[in-house]
Amino acid sequence: SQKIEQNSEALNIQEGKTATLTCNYTNYSPAYLQWYRQDPGRGPVFLLLIRENEKEKRKERLKVTFDTTLKQSLFHITASQPADSATYLCALDGRGYSTLTFGKGTMLLVSP
Amino acid sequence: DAGVIQSPRHEVTEMGQEVTLRCKPISGHNSLFWYRQTMMRGLELLIYFNNNVPIDDSGMPEDRFSAKMPNASFSTLKIQPSEPRDSAVYFCASSQDRGGSYEQYFGPGTRLTVT
């Protein structure tokens, strides 16, 4: 069966360190993978999109990698700040015009 | 643009009552999605529309759920009759088009509590 797995345990790190979140999937061949941020009581907010033929994508302090062989995406936040504390969701698609399927998300807590 | 607008933000109702959730997508977006989020199951797609036409409703849990999109600027999700297990946060999202290459813009959600 199809699965998207994100670490259900919260990731606690100190301010200034690099946070690395993992998204693993099985029985998918996504053409695109997206990452979203969700704060308590709010809807998810889009952060980054990476295509299957891209190994890495960067946006300011954010970096996403996409390894279709390992069936894994890593999401990095460098020089993390307490304001980065939130739940981060990965989402991937099938082929053609299929919609996104979301992982359950990983909560990141950045302490000062 | 004001973003995706949802109403009400909170809804508390008794089992057996009808519940109607409303959504106004971002102007110019032609795809609209309804999701349900719970701690146990995460964010689940219920149904999505493209150009006001329902494309995939396989995520709708049962016949008690129905959704409509009478025009490009309005959609409703109705639950009749409601049950306690329907308690969740319901999100509406829109995107320029369908497919994984388009990011989705989410509304603030409706927190539904069925007692």
Image (cartoon, grey):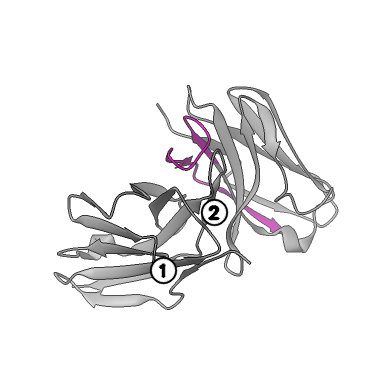
Task: Answer yes or no: are tags 1 and 2 on the same subunit.
Answer: yes
Count of marks overlaid on the render = 2
Q: Residue at x 51, y 39 (%)?
A: B99
Chain to which the residue tagged by mark 1 belongs:
A
Q: Does A74 sit above or below residue A35? A: below
Callout 2 amino acid: Thr
Name the image quarter holding the C terminus of chain A: bottom left
- Residue B1 point in image, percent of width and height: 40, 26
Instruction: Say whether disc 1 or disc 2 marks the residue closer to the N-terminus.
Output: 2
Q: Residue at x 76, y 54 (%)?
A: B61
Q: Nearer the viewer, residue A56 or B48?
A: A56
Where, by quadrant of the figure, is residue A15 drawn?
bottom left
In the rendered structure, which segment of residues is drawn in magenta? Answer: B93-115
- Residue B76 point in image, percent of width and height: 68, 35
Q: Is residue A79 left or right of residue A48?
A: left
Near mark 1 (Cα within 10 A), the count class, few <14, some 14-19 or many ≥20, is many
Q: Residue at x 28, y 69 (%)?
A: A20
Where, by quadrant of the figure, is residue B18 drawn?
top right
Q: Does A75 sit above or below residue B20? A: below
- Residue A8 point in image, percent of width and height: 46, 75
Q: Can you identify the residue that label 1 sits on?
A: A106
Name the image quarter holding the N terminus of chain A: bottom right
Callout 1 amino acid: Thr
Determine if the magenta segment contains residue B101: yes
- Residue B58 point in image, percent of width and height: 73, 48
Residue B50 visible somewhere in the drawing: yes
The mark found on residue A101 in the picture is 2
